[in-house]
Amino acid sequence: MRLDKKTKILKVCVRNLLIIAGLFSLLTSFSELVQATEMPFTVKTIVPDNQIDKRKTFFNLQVKPSQQQIITANLTNTTSQDVTIKVNVNSAKTNANGVIEYGETNIRADKSLEYAIPDLVKYPSEVKISANSSKEVLFHITMPKKKYNGIILGGIVFQQKESRISPSVKGTSIQNHYAYAVALSLKESDNQVSPNLNLLKVSPGQNNARNVISAQIQNDKSILLSKVKVSAKVYAKGAKTPVYTSVTTDMQIAPNSNFKYPISLNGTEMKPGNYTLKMSVTGTAYVTPKTWYFTKNFKIKSAEASSLNKSDVDIKANTNNNNLIFILVGLLLLLIVTILIIIIIRQNKKLKK
């Protein structure tokens, strides 16, 4: 009995040691992951004297026609290895979520954009920073000769060229891409630009592999719109009740940009036919918000609807679930029919006796 008791105690001790070892291994791995996700470099802007609001850390400059200026960003390598940083300057654009993009995107520049900010700025494409050291990066700005009202908005993006790869718990790898964006706004005049929005096009499409009605909204003025609210209703042509509705708030629209606002079909099949979109868009350029109202007829063709329905991931999932239900119902009916046949055969045998 004493031996059994000692054996039980030994088993409990071994089990507890294994649990502690497992927890220690997990915590060590978690610590490695945390270290792997630390930023390998930092960015500090050196705001010049013509910074409009010196409390801002992004570049918000008051400039003049033909003015040439150098602005500076200080990059610090926080690691014990050399780091190469890719540098890029892009015009600001608006994505489908009503968020301003300062990095490289597939979004096309709007036709109303008079000056693309990359054409006005010269800069190094790459910067190599030694371990645990800093380096200044210079950007040479040359403003157009013609006087410009409104703002020219873009962004400076710093991205690590080589991605750091760290082993994970199960032997796979985690690859981290580090990027840092700084807005660059150039303003020549305090004259207010009257904001304006246009509804360019309404068409069927997809967003994140899900069916939507896309309403292409354009800001053709050199002014940033904030606190944007979109309220949209889609009607079958001539109907009084909308088939699809969408309301989105707290968006922004970059100067001289357009974006495709998605009206979700919420996992339902897209049906061909003639439709009418009624939409209101409210945005603020200065202090007082302004609202635009749009009505536009559009058509969904049978081929378009069929193609989009086939690639909609929600419809595929619903179809697979429906197929499973049909199979289960079929099997249940087959089982009931089989039981009935067995009962009938047994009753006939009893009657013959």
Image (cartoon, rainbow, N blue to C red):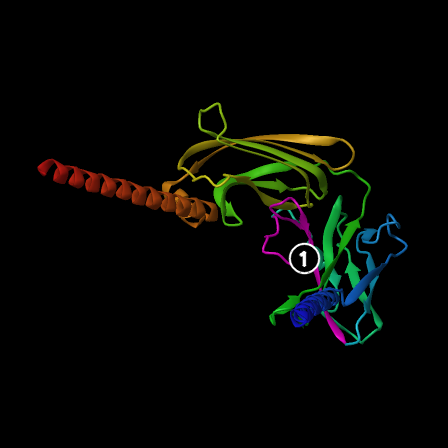
The residue wearing badge 1 is: 103
353 or 221, nearer to the observer? 353
132 or 292, nearer to the observer? 132
- Looking at the rendering, the stretch of residues picked out in magenta corresponds to 82-110
Residue 209 is covered by the magenta coloring: no
308 or 214, nearer to the observer? 308
- Residue at screen point 69% across, 35% down: 283
- Residue at screen point 64% across, 31% down: 292
The location of residue 154, given as percent across then percent down, is 72, 53
303 or 267, nearer to the observer? 267
The location of residue 105, given as percent across then percent down, is 62, 56
Outermost residue toward the top?
240
Figure quadrant of the C terminus: top left
The quarter of the displayed image where residue 72 is located: bottom right
Query: Does residue 297 appear anywhere in the picture?
Result: yes
- Residue at screen point 60% across, 37% down: 198
**Badge 1 density bin: few <14, some 14–19, many ≥20, Cα 10 Å:** many
Q: Is residue 22 above or below residue 58?
A: below
Outermost residue toward the left?
352
In the picture, measured across the screen, residue 86 lies left or right of residue 263, that is right
The location of residue 118, given as percent across then percent down, is 70, 59
- Indicate the secondary structure of the residue bearing disc 1: loop
The quarter of the displayed image where residue 342 is located: top left
In the picture, measured across the screen, residue 116 lies left or right of residue 43, that is left
Query: Does residue 86 appear anywhere in the picture?
Result: no
- Residue at screen point 39% across, 37% down: 272
Q: Is residue 316 above or below residue 227?
A: below
Amino acid type, callout 1: Gly
Outermost residue toward the front?
1
